[in-house]
Image (cartoon, grey):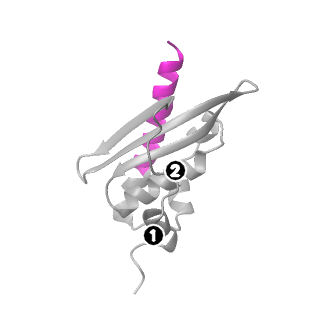
Amino acid sequence: MKPYYSKQVIEHFLHPKNLGKLKDADGVGKVGNPACGDVMELFIKVEKKNSKEIIKDIKFYTLGCAAAIATSDMACELVKGKTIQEALEINYQDIVGELGDLPPIKIHCSVLAREGLKAAVEDYRKKSKK
């Protein structure tokens, strides 16, 4: 019988590298899915280098299942050190692919992680204009 979750999902669930909150975050994105009860909050710290906006640090705080926590952590891993534009080009399939797949019923977790990142960037841009 095939395991429900890949080794990568289990690793990111049990040992997330980016769990926590950034108190001085430049942008915060909070998203949730009422149908499953998952709530994700992503915090980004942006550094401007050579007229580029780089995600210097990113953390998450997620209340949810193993897939929700693993996809939040993987989204952070994929965008850390990238420009804002590069980060926004990452989609839910990229997150799922890096985790070695997810059960179809859990794909929405990767979509939610992507939406949380997008919301954090939108919050950062809104704050930057002030």
Figure quadrant of the N terminus:
bottom left
Counting from the top left corner in percent of width and height, residue 38 is at 30, 51
Residue kind at label 2, given as amino acid type: Ala
What's under tag 1, amino acid-wise?
Ile
Looking at the image, tell me whether mark 2 or mark 1 is earlier in sequence order: 1
Q: Which mark is residue 75?
A: 2
**Residue, far right:** 50
Q: Which residues are magenta?
A: 111-130
Between 68 and 100, the one nearer to me in the picture: 68
Q: Is residue 83 above or below residue 101?
A: above
Residue farthest front in this picture: 23
* Mark 2, other Cα within 10 Å: few <14 / some 14–19 / many ≥20: many
* 88 within the magenta span: no
Q: Residue at x 49, y 32 (%)?
A: 25
124 above or below 1? above
Q: Label 1: which residue?
A: 10
Q: Position of residue 99 (x, y in %)?
A: 52, 64
60 left or right of 39 in image: right
